[in-house]
Image: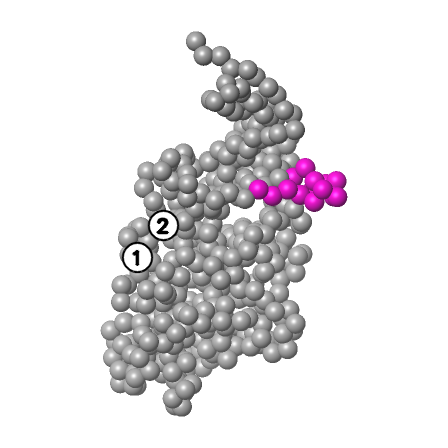
């Protein structure tokens, strides 16, 4: 019988990663990249906080030893790991530090991808504080419910019908969606608080990256050459959304401005088409039309959808990413409409109620109002969203009242 000499070194620790969504295939272990982070040692509150990050080509994972996502395995017992040196026959015993790895949405663009600590490190919302109390002092039943809810936020089934019902409730927009627009989980594009004109509030190059714009420009010839007769025929055939046809009927005459306008309108059509895809269509291998530019198709799916692993990989669009897509559509429309947008067409194209569109517009800093318009058929109410300075961003008190 083989024997081994044991030695214990309390200064060394072995890091163990437990993936909540299943086991990692042994063939893929070499393609996983890990990063280990420790809190500021000069800060008493943060020095004991640690985070383990794992990245693969399809998914990113985050584990931490604090907050509601922390592993509860080490609360009542201590774990050790033995490392056997087959040459010398000695086994080194180390303390084990276990991290529970949770999937993280990989919707951050490659061009601007940065690692930022969760809001639990800096500023916590009411929900996050409540989750921490439940994790620390709640009953086992409540802790299991909390763990299940946190998993479902990422891995749950995000059906389109659920989107409408959730957004129509008072808690429609999750607290994380109303955080600073420059944080990782925001649904809004980065906001320039020092803007002096409406055109400087949002960066159009963030909405449509230059590489995507160039690829879209090559496919936008059909819009550039569109005549009023062609547009009227498209309207009869319902070939394009109403907002697209409305913009095409008011295209500029100069070649340079018309070409740029056609490019942005084509990209807007891509965004609306992606938004209206059903969950079953998203599961297809190629959910977007193959005649679209490859770079645009890849970038849109990476930014606004998420792939989860199980018995088979599935692509979904969680509610947060769908809200993010709606905000990008609204910002692009504001640019095309010179920052005064009539919402009737978009309400039809996106199948949204005006209350939901109002909430998104308010998050973007727009002022909203209703105008009465008299036509041959009678008077009707038309809803507008205007982006002007100073911005009318929701305050913290207003956000709390919504929740």
Instruction: Look at the numbered disc 1 and give the secondary structure of its residue.
Output: loop
Q: Quadrant of the N terminus?
A: top left
For residue 196: magenta? no
**Whole-percent x and y of residue 384?**
51, 74
**Number of disc labels:** 2
Q: Is residue 72 left or right of residue 48?
A: left
Residue at point 47%, 65% (across, down): 328
| Residue sitting nearer the eye, 83 or 355 | 83
Kindly indicate the quadrant of the structure image that contains residue 78. Answer: top right
**Whole-percent x and y of residue 372?**
49, 77
Q: Which residue is mark 1?
A: 287
**Whole-percent x and y of residue 54?**
49, 43
* Segment colored magenta: 36-49
Q: Are marks 2 and 1 in contact (CB under 8 Å)?
A: yes
Majority secondary structure of magenta residues: loop
Is 85 placed above or below 217 here? above
**What's the mark number on residue 161?**
none
Q: Residue furthest bottom?
A: 254
**Whole-percent x and y of residue 129?**
64, 42
Kindly indicate the quadrant of the structure image that contains residue 265. Answer: bottom left
| Residue sitting nearer the eye, 319 or 348 | 319
How packed mark 1 is, by other alpha carbons closer than 10 Å (few <14, some 14-19, many 20 or more), is: some
* Residue 143 can be seen, yes or no: no
How packed mark 2 is, by other alpha carbons closer than 10 Å (few <14, some 14-19, many 20 or more), is: some
Q: How is the image coloured?
A: one colour
* Residue 176 can be seen, yes or no: yes
**What's the mark number on residue 315?**
2
Residue at point 55%, 15% (across, down): 5
- Of the numbered discs 2 and 1, the one sitting upstream in the chain is 1
Separation (CA) of disc 2 from disc 1: 9 Å
Instruction: Look at the numbered disc 2 and give the secondary structure of its residue.
Output: strand
Residue at point 48%, 33% (across, down): 18
């Amino acid at each position: 019988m083989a024997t081994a000499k044991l030695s214990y070194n309390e200064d060394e620790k072995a890091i163990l990663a437990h993936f909540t969504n299943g086991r990692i295939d042994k063939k893929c272990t070499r393609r996983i990249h890990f990063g280990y982070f420790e809190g500021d040692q000069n800060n008493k509150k943060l020095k004991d906080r640690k985070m383990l990050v794992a990245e693969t080509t399809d998914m990113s994972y985050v584990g931490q030893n604090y907050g509601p996502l922390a592993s509860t395995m080490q609360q009542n017992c201590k774990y050790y790991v033995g490392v056997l040196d087959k040459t010398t026959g000695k086994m080194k015993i180390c303390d084990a530090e276990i991290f529970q790895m949770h999937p993280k949405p990989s919707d951050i663009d490659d061009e601007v991808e940065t690692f930022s600590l969760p809001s639990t490190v800096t500023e916590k919302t009411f929900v996050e504080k409540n989750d921490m109390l439940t994790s620390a002092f709640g009953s086992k039943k409540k802790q299991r419910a909390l763990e299940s809810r946190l998993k479902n936020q990422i891995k749950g089934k995000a059906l389109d019908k659920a989107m409408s019902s959730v957004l129509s409730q008072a808690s429609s927009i999750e607290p994380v969606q109303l955080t600073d627009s420059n944080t990782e989980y925001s649904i809004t594009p980065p906001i320039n608080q020092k803007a002096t004109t409406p055109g400087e509030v949002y960066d159009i190059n963030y909405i449509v990256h230059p590489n995507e714009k160039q690829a879209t420009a090559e496919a936008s010839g059909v819009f550039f050459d569109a005549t009023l007769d062609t547009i009227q025929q498209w309207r009869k055939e319902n070939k394009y959304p109403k907002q697209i046809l409305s913009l095409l009927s008011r295209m500029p005459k100069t070649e340079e401005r018309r070409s740029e306008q056609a490019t942005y309108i084509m990209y807007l059509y891509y965004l609306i088409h992606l938004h209206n895809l059903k969950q079953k269509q998203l599961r297809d291998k190629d959910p977007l039309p193959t005649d679209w530019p490859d770079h645009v198709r890849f970038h849109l799916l990476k930014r606004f959808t998420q792939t989860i692993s199980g018995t088979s990989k599935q692509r979904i669009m969680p509610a947060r990413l769908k809200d993010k897509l709606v905000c990008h559509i609204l910002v692009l429309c504001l640019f095309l409409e010179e920052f005064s947008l009539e919402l009737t067409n978009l309400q039809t194209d996106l199948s949204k109620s005006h209350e939901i569109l109002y909430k998104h517009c308010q998050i973007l800093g727009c002022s909203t109002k209703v105008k009465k318009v008299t036509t041959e058929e009678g008077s009707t109410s038309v809803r507008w969203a205007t982006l002007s300075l100073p911005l009318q961003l929701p305050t913290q008190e207003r956000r709390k009242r919504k929740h």
